[in-house]
Amino acid sequence: MEKWALVPAVQGTEALADRIGKDYGKIVLVYVVDSNADLPTASVGTAIKKAEDRIELIKGTLTAKEIIVKDYIEWGSWIDKLKAIMRIEQCDEVLVPKELSSLAKNLKKEKLKVTEL
């Protein structure tokens, strides 16, 4: 059975696309502009543009492996959005690169199933 996973599209996750195998049938890429961060409007636009570029890069690698890819760019709380999108998209787990172990640790605290690749 193919697994479905969510990938937070933060800086450092680009290399993760090469590590994701064909045992994943669907990957959901998510970037959240944190509503709690006190960012100037110009910085929000820049962050979104960088996220879009990162998502397109990851998407290209995954679609070449014939993996279905969906993406979301949202406004709000990272944890709340990840939990909601995981439920909506019926994802089995969150994939995080080993290099971002602090992110993985925070997600595990929230009782999310996390796999570090």
Image (cartoon, rainbow, N blue to C red):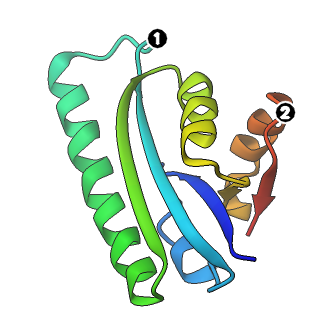
Percent position of residue 6, x then y = 59, 53
- Contact between labelled residues 2 and 1, with CB atoms less than 8 Å apart: no
- Judged left or right of residue 45, residue 38 is right
Q: Where is residue 28 drawn, in percent x and y?
A: 50, 55
For marks 1 and 2 on the same chain, the one whose residue lies earlier in the sequence: 1
- Indicate the quadrant where residue 4 lies: bottom right
Label 2: how many residues lie within 10 Å, few (<14), some (14-19) or many (20+)? Answer: few
- Three-letter code for the amino acid on which mark 1 is drawn: Asn
Residue 40 place in picture, x, y as percent:
22, 16
Number of marks: 2
Front-most of 52 and 43? 52
- Which residue is depicted at the point 83% across and 38% down? 108
Which residue is identified by label 2?
Answer: 111
Say which residue appears at 56% left-offset and 55% top-offset: 7
Give the position of the C terminus as an image quadrant: bottom right
Say if 12 sits above or below 31 in the image: below
Pick the front one: 68 or 44: 68
Amino acid carrying label 2: it is Lys
Report x, y in % for residue 16.
57, 71
Mark 1: which secondary structure? loop
Q: Nearer the viewer, mark 1 or mark 2?
A: 2
Looking at the rendered structure, the secondary structure element under dot 2 is loop
For image coordinates 40% across by 70% down, the residue present is: 58
Which dot marks residue 36? 1
